[in-house]
Amino acid sequence: MTKQLSSFAGKFFLSILVIAFLASTVAAQAADVKLDLQLIWGTNDADSPNPQHKRIEQKFPFKWKNYFEVNRQQVSVAPKAMKAVIMSPHCSVNVSNLADGRIEVKLLGKGKKVRTEIHPLASGMLVIGGDATNDTSWFVVVKEVKP
């Protein structure tokens, strides 16, 4: 009888540990996601025509020589919610927290959908962009902000 009781207590304790682990995993996934969004313009021109754009010294693996930050915002997105972020008069981003460790990012240019990406947060940053005129580029870099 003591052996059965000991076996039952061990299984009960193991079950409690598994339930606690699963509950903590679900709670961690169901938290708000804090993101840093950065709209960048790439060009071969030495300067931006807009003096408010900030030159970025970081090099990107793209063909343009110079990059400028047009706008940068930090947002917090609740689980199963979507946040619309206006990055410029021509660019906006809709970010959805899928509450499973992934986000969905919809990039809009001039009000029209350019691209949609589903991105696992654990894989680092997401770069999503669209076509531009005059041999230039624009793209949004999305990074999770860790506490």
Image (spheres, rainbow, N blue to C red):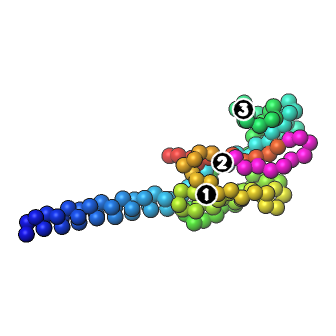
Residue 132 magenta:
yes
Q: Residue at the spot x=44%, y=62% of the render?
A: 26
The part of the image, by quadrant, that contains residue 98 is bottom right
Q: Secondary structure at mark 1?
A: strand
Q: Looking at the picture, which amino acid does disc 1 mark?
A: Ile
Q: Give the camera-side residue of 16 and 50.
A: 16
Q: Is residue 129 in sight in this rendering?
A: yes
Q: Give the camera-side residue of 108 and 62.
A: 62
Q: Secondary structure at mark 3?
A: loop
Q: Which residue is mark 2?
A: 126
Q: Secondary structure at mark 2?
A: strand
Q: Residue at the spot x=89%, y=40% of the render?
A: 135
Q: Looking at the picture, which amino acid does disc 2 mark?
A: Leu
Q: Is residue 70 in sight in this rendering?
A: no
Say whether disc 2 or disc 3 marks the residue closer to the N-terminus.
3
| 45 relative to 24, above or below | above
Instruction: Look at the image and give the residue range highlighted in magenta.
Output: 127-136
Examine the residues drawn in magenta and state their main secondary structure. loop
Q: CA distance from mark 1 to mark 2?
A: 10 Å
Q: Are marks 2 and 3 in contact (CB under 8 Å)?
A: no
List the single residue furthest toward the right.
134
From the viewer's perspective, is 142 left or right of 45?
left
Q: CA distance from mark 2 to mark 3?
A: 16 Å
Q: Residue 45, percent across and down?
A: 87, 33
Residue 59 is labelled as 3
Q: Residues within 10 Å of mark 2 (few under 14, many from 20)?
A: some
Residue 23 magenta:
no
Q: Which residue is mark 1?
A: 103
